[in-house]
Amino acid sequence: MQSEGGQSGHDLLSAQEEKILRTIDQRAPEMIARVKAWSAINSGSHHRAGLAAQRAVLMEAFAALDGEMREVPLPSAHEVDAAGQTQVREFEPALRIIKRPEAPVQIILTGHYDTVFAKDSPFQEWQMRGADVINGPGVADMKGGLIVMREALLALEKSPDRAALGYCVLISPDEEIGSLGSAALLAKHGAQADLGMTYEPALADGSLSGARKGSGNFSLVVRGRSAHAGRAHHEGRNAMVAAARAVQALANLSGARDGLTVNVARIDGGGANNIVPDLAIVRFNVRLAQPDDAAWAQQAFEKITADIDRDDGISASLQGGFTRPPKPMAPPNARLFDMTKKAGAALGLDINWRDTGGVCEGNNLWAVGCPNVDTLGVRGGDIHSPREFAILSSFPERARLSALMLLRFASGVFDAKSLKRGGTRA
């Protein structure tokens, strides 16, 4: 549809859309007050009491949607501790809100309520960095994003077309540590949805993430034999030296496939200088651009492990795996980005995107065939550091963007069903 001025109808707001979106601007002070209060709650991934406190305020806030709200228990996961033993990790529940599951269009909106900042981190409080920038733990990643999600859904409920759109909100406690507990829940609800909207922060200039690499986390456990470093050095078998050989072999894999990187992050083990170390644990992360590279990399890791295991008096075992496959800019994702860009244009925003090596729940959704856009949160930057910031004016701005997308999916201006079936209408 073209207007008289030659502008696409998708680039113009209807009177109904303008009326609904105006209410978001009026709620900007409440959004800012909310992010300040939420940022003051330490909800680091390993701080269960803090996560429980954050979940409680989320339940209070999202109750306004009047959906079916439930705390969903998550399965435990296994991890290797500093002693090389496999331990069970328990997770806090995920928070799920379902509304209108019978509606013809179904959307999954995901986010996380954990942060990377530990209980004893010195970064615990927010502060202003000028009139429009707030610095604080989680203000961008992603407590600000959760606020944007909530406001967009509240706006949807004002639409006369809301009955056509149902949704599942899924807020997890473990995204920052790989979504090990929530992966199955993401897969279940992602497979049932026509599309996904995820609230990681946009870049400070408003750009969104496009294609994403896949990711895996591994632990290589190397065991040797301890001995006195002076009296019986020859009787020892140095696990740290064997691990060092593995580290170099792992590092050499970076670039062996286009876009493949192996980052050795930490080596646990060792002890006093006068003892031959009998344990070393190599922790490493892998990023890859092509799904088929996961099998190649896995074989390479297993070969390195087997080579170390053959050393006299040394044993080696590999644990971990690939938890998030790559998310390419495949045609369904590209069509959804085009819809996002059209919504932005109607609001006077020039929406662009950049490929990234980072991963998020958008990878999980795409793994089950759910097209998604995964950086609909606030504009910000320096995430995962004490410099993390969010731009306050972007709270209503990004809430308006998501709200308009939801309104148009509900009204049929944007054809959600076209994404999975391969249509081109947007």
Image (cartoon, rainbow, N blue to C red):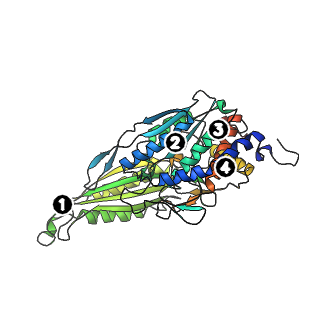
The quadrant where residue 224 appears: bottom left
Foreground residue among 312 and 166: 166
Residue 310 lies, in percent from the top left, at 26, 57
Rounded to the nearest angstrom, the CA distance separating label 3 from label 4 is 15 Å
Nearer-N-terminus badge (3/2): 2
Rounded to the nearest angstrom, the CA distance separating label 1 from label 3 is 64 Å
Nearer-N-terminus badge (2/4): 4
Given the image, on which type of amino acid does mark 3 rest? Leu
Residue 327 lies, in percent from the top left, at 55, 48
Q: Identify which residue is drawn at 56% across, 36% down.
A: 65
Nearer-N-terminus badge (1/3): 3
Rounded to the nearest angstrom, the CA distance separating label 2 from label 4 is 18 Å
How many C-alpha atoms fall within 10 Å of the one at disc 3: few (<14), some, or many (≥20)?
many
Given the image, on which type of amino acid does mark 2 rest? Ala
How many C-alpha atoms fall within 10 Å of the one at disc 1: few (<14), some, or many (≥20)?
some
Foreground residue among 26 and 270: 26
Residue 159 lies, in percent from the top left, at 68, 35
Nearer-N-terminus badge (4/1): 4
The residue indicated by pointer 4 is 25
Residue 73 lies, in percent from the top left, at 40, 37
Furthest toward the top, the residue is 102
Given the image, on which type of amino acid does mark 4 rest? Asp
How many C-alpha atoms fall within 10 Å of the one at disc 4: few (<14), some, or many (≥20)?
some
Judged left or right of residue 420, residue 248 is left
The quadrant where residue 230 appears: bottom left
The residue indicated by pointer 2 is 61
Rounded to the nearest angstrom, the CA distance separating label 4 from label 1 is 66 Å
Rounded to the nearest angstrom, the CA distance separating label 3 from label 2 is 16 Å
Nearer-N-terminus badge (1/2): 2
How many C-alpha atoms fall within 10 Å of the one at disc 2: few (<14), some, or many (≥20)?
few
